[in-house]
Amino acid sequence: MKPATYLLAGILALCSPLCTWTAANSDYREVRGSELGNVTNFSTFLLDRSSGMLYMGARDAIVAVDTANLSKFDQIVWDVPDEKKKACVAKGKTEADCNNYIRLLEFLGDGRIYACGTYAFDPQCAFVNISPFSLEEYEDGSVKMETGKGKCPFEPSQHYTAVMAGGILYTAATSNFLGTLFDISRAMGIEQERIRTERSINWLSDPEFVGSAFIEQDEKNNPEGEDDKIYFFFTEVAKEYDLYTKVKVPRVARVCKSDIGGMKTLQRRWTTFLKAQLVCEDRASGQRFNILTDIFTKQHQPGDPSSTFFYGIFTSQWETDEMSAVCVYSLEDITKVMDGPFKELKKSCENWMNPEPVPTPRPGQCLNAALKAEGFESSLKLPDKVLTFMRDHPLMENSVVSSPLLIRTGITYTKLAVTLTTVSKGNNKQSATVLHLGTDHGELHRVAIVGQNATLLQELTRFPASEPVNNILLYKGGVLVGSPHSLVQLPADGCSPYSTCEVCERARVLGCVWRQKEKVCDLAVTEPGEGVQPEAPVNQCGSRDDHCSPATVELHVVENLRVMLPCVQVSPRPCHWLHLPHRHTRRHHTDLEVHVTPKSLGTYKCLCEEGGREHPPCLRAAYHLTLEKPSTGSSAAVVGSRNYMVWYVVSFFLGAALALGVIRCVARQRRMKRGGGGHPLSASEKSRDLFPSSDTPQSPSSGSLFSEALPFAEKRNGTLNGHGGHIARQNCTHIYANSSGLKLQESSINLAEELDGLERMRLKGEEAGLGEGLGDMGGLEEDLAKMAVLRGAPLAKCEESSI
Ligand SMILES: *[C@@H]1O[C@H](CO)[C@@H](O)[C@H](O)[C@H]1NC(C)=O
Ligand SMILES: *[C@@H]1O[C@H](CO)[C@@H](O)[C@H](O)[C@H]1NC(C)=O
Ligand SMILES: *[C@@H]1O[C@H](CO)[C@@H](O)[C@H](O)[C@H]1NC(C)=O
Ligand SMILES: *[C@@H]1O[C@H](CO)[C@@H](O)[C@H](O)[C@H]1NC(C)=O
């Protein structure tokens, strides 16, 4: 061979790993805090959309990362002096909490960033020069700081929100060390204009602040001279219901940008603070989600502020299971409620019958051109009558109502972002919404909403299960997802995020098709004769089950077992179960718990109304329960229980004998020590104490169910493979007496969780390029062997479920 050939081969050999590396990494990148100068506890994100620099607030540090190359970073250290830390610890706080957690970063618009940190429970704000990246200092080299009270929380994990409006910071945060005072305030600008909320429970009652938005009027289209507004979203304790339990309510509040407070009444307080209740309720089931946990603001028509929508993640105070729902509210609906009647909070008989008349100009209204023409140029000019009414009526009578786009059980969403796309179906153009949802277990889920239909596209595990997603930012067709210890960058737009055949198949609702030859997910070309048409649309991925016609799962069970049959709901519409009528089932949301008796054997089908009532329901899951054949399973079970009885009897005597032995020994020693003066412990008394320890029945598990359950089981809670996933949260082990009076251990495995897990595993498999992922169960079984429930580990606490 010629040297040139060697050279060529060498170059190719060098290049190919390099090329595949860049290809594989062009759409997915990750950095951990340890690679960014050993920084931890990332909280707030601030993105400079023109330069692509991402600023992250962390513990004792601010990090700047180039989103074009995550390995390029810069860092500022801003920590707390040792004396101050000691003083903080002396006040009863933990050493870890007595650091400076940077919670607020906002551009000042003059080449500087305003940064606030908890600074050992004494919040401080500082100025960061962007170039060179550094903290502004006095001549003596000390950091230029000002108080951060009311801007940044005292406690590192406390909720707060802040928004920049026209170069002025508006915040909602606690303003004392104890965390008992809450203010929504204008936190910058002229001293006289730094106004805040009245400290009255009618205004704010134990709020947990969630988000805020600055909605600027369209400059070119504002004939009425309407004022710009700032919206705050939070959950607070309802004061309008006279109930014994503390009922939480999600709220939206609004203040006007030109508000500078009243002259006498409401001096240095908002004169425009109005709030309304948000309702996120599934009317079909009556489920109400009353705790708001995140909000995302989206203009449906970019550039048109009146097309603003707010997407919220909700959970429920009343549900015992983890649940999350997503509801969306339009700015228009919020405005309508704010323009509507006021709620009467002082419920005396008098004003119950005759509500106080609303004075003019309307309390809480932003000043517009018409009001200014009437002589109300500023809020200082407003009459006392208007201001006292405003002070006593901050809450609106009507609520802003929405029904969930999505409801999920067993999952806690922490953050969301929303992208919009247009799907063309023939000549019709339809808009589709993609929700990018972060979970408390380091996962990113994507859900497509087209019309009334919600489709779960993808569930990606991106961080260890101990790291909740705490930031999601959309930028340049990608998404930046943050946890307290890492940052990842993924594609978000178009079809490229759905990089395997099965996921692409699900993304068909977004107009994506899988091109088998190139192995890419691409936008379908709808014009005939142009481009590539989708090849063999169904089953091309080799997946066995089609949507709405899943294969029936055969389950071999033994009597008296409780089996949880999962039904994964992908749309907010209701699901129902079809089975022979008997009284041995119990619904857990969409899942069904079956107590196995001869009468409860047979077929179970879960049907969901995905396309509305006018469409036939979609079969989401089907199971067939049969008794384990006597020759193998149930005889084994009987043998098992007999063995168990023998073991029980033997262990009783062994335990008792051992106990007696120990007690004798102890008693003798004591007698010897005390010179024989003490009373020996009563053997019977002590053996009662010792008895339970030899009586924790760890009987062999009902093997047949477990062997069936194996393929479904995967991870939930607790890590299996170091990178996320978790073991069934309800690893319930029920112990109760059966008819024969013998103690028998029974287990109910929540297959829902585990099927769900299967889904995750499959997704993960696909991600890792394992193709179908389902075929290879070897490694999984090994992992399962480690699962607590299969080892018969300590009895888990479990929900009440009596028969
Ligand atoms: C990172 O920080 C930890 C604790 O703060 C420390 O133990 C470790 O040595 C640091 N590692 C590097 C590379 O600086
Ligand atoms: C990213 O930045 C690092 C550090 O500056 C540099 O070594 C690397 O070559 C850059 N990578 C790319 C793809 O530009
Ligand atoms: C900071 O990170 C550590 C380590 O993961 C964690 O234990 C701690 O709770 C975090 N603190 C805050 C305030 O988030
Ligand atoms: C919703 O789904 C149903 C069936 O699953 C389908 O018939 C209907 O066309 C879908 N609606 C939209 C708006 O995509």
Image (cartoon, rainbow, N blue to C red):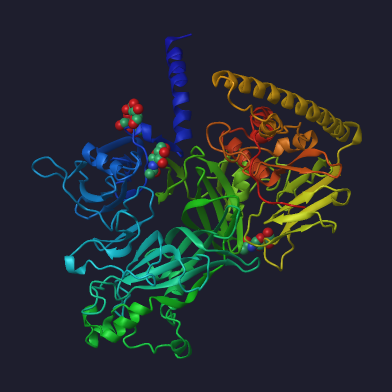
Residue 459 in view of the camera: yes
Residue at point 47%, 71% (across, down) = 277
On the image, the x and y values in percent for residue 454 come to 60, 58
On the image, the x and y values in percent for residue 313 come to 50, 58
Residue extending furthest toward the right: 631
Q: Is residue 177 above or below residue 342?
A: above
Looking at the image, which is closer to me, 735 or 724?
735
For this view, does 61 lie left or right of residue 701? left
On the image, the x and y values in percent for residue 719 come to 56, 35
Residue at point 44%, 88% (across, down) = 351
Q: Is residue 147 above or below residue 222?
A: above
Q: Quadrant of residue 376?
A: bottom left
Looking at the image, which is closer to me, 493 or 635?
635
Residue at point 41%, 80% (across, down) = 339
Q: Is residue 527 above or below residue 615?
A: above
Residue extending furthest toward the left: 139
